[in-house]
Image (cartoon, grey):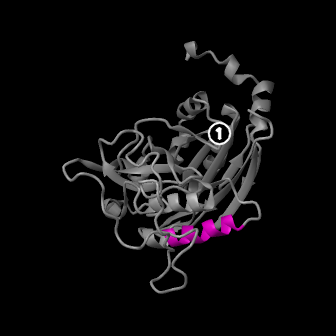
Amino acid sequence: MPEEIKLKVSLIQMDVAFGDPEQNRRRAEAMIKEALKQRKKPDVLVLPEMWTTGYDLARISDIADREGSPTIDWLQEVAGKNRVNIVAGSIADRRAMNLDAAGSKAARTPDGTGGCRKVYSFQAAGAGEKESNVGGPQSGAAGTRSSPNKKEGVFNSSYVINRDGEIVARYDKVHRFRLMEEDRYLSPGKEAVTFELDGIPCGIIICYDLRFPEFVRKLALLGAKVLFIPAQWPRPREIHWKLLNIVRAIENQFFVVAVNRAGKDGKEEFPGMSLVVDPWGEVLLEGSDRQEVLTATLDLSRIDHARRKITVFEDRRPELY
């Protein structure tokens, strides 16, 4: 990897309104606009876990996106119009259970045909401008694209969108967190996912997946140099959040970009503390407990330096474990 490669990432550490996708999209829109106002725009925007709905699981089937609509449709337009990559956190995504692993929306242009639709801003009706480079779809429920005779599930899904507004990856959360009753309401993912952004190999996991080192190691062995982690990690276990992110970066000798939510969700409080950690375990960026946009630049040459200095991957003996 050329030593001059750098990646500027902006983390959208937002509070999440419980069970209110429209309000959350408006909030995300404002924060994305803030991130894109920087003199040198970020290369990648990253959102947290389940940021459109929060954990309103009792109603999740009703308020979830339908195959990424309207949320991912909107973010595709934002990415294409602003020439920015977006790791779209994760959303509750309702779709047919038998879709292929890449998803029916993979590699689709913003309108599904190669064209672009009008961009609508998330604002109250009649308020201000209707068009924006960081706009959103019109309010209202999304229609499902799934055939009515196919069994549907709701997945905790991360979509990744490139600068052209194309979906390059979708990851469904593999490890469901029982304390949040994900095993009751959400369908499990079935595979690890890697992808490229600007030619850089990346991987993605979601929140609880962080506690499974063998799963993260698989992504490193598949070539990931940057690991993205959207999360809703609660305050009582914030020390676990920080330490596990640091350890995953050290043991896999890659960058970790971890975006947690802030605020409260009923009795549950979330500490923010979004993190960017380098391959040596140095914390390059740590968020406060408030809603904010955080930006860091990753120097990808540090990965090769770490791996040449301490040859973990060359010294592995997988035949013994």
Whether 279 is drawn above or below 296: the answer is above
Q: Main secondary structure of the magenta part?
A: helix
129 shown above or below 167: below
Q: Quick one: which residue is furthest to the bottom in this view? A: 126
Could you say which quadrant of the image residue 78 lies in?
Answer: bottom right
Q: Is residue 289 above or below residue 300?
A: below
Q: Which of the 4 quarters of the picture holds residue 4?
A: top right
Residue 187 pos. (x, y %): 35, 46
Q: Which residue is tagged 1?
A: 199
- Give percent across and percent down for residue 59: 33, 64
* Residue 218 in the image: above or below residue 291: above
Decide if residue 288 is in sight here: no
Is label 1 in a helix, a strand or a loop? loop
Stretch in magenta: 25-37
Q: Residue at x 21, y 53 (%)?
A: 148
Give the amino acid type for the residue marked by disc 1 in the picture: Gly
**Where does the C terminus fall, quadrant-wise?**
top right
Q: Nearer the viewer, residue 86 or 257?
A: 86
Q: Residue at x 67, y 65 (%)?
A: 36
Instruction: Judge whether residue 134 can be spotted in this image.
Output: yes
> Front-most of 183 and 78?
78
Left or right of 231? Residue 239 is right
In which quadrant is the N terminus drawn? top right
Q: Residue at x 41, y 49 (%)?
A: 105
Is residue 220 within the magenta segment? Answer: no
| Residue ID at (64%, 57%) | 11
Residue 294 percent across, percent down from the top left: 70, 60
In magenta segment, residue 36: yes
Rendered location of residue 193, percent (x, y): 50, 37
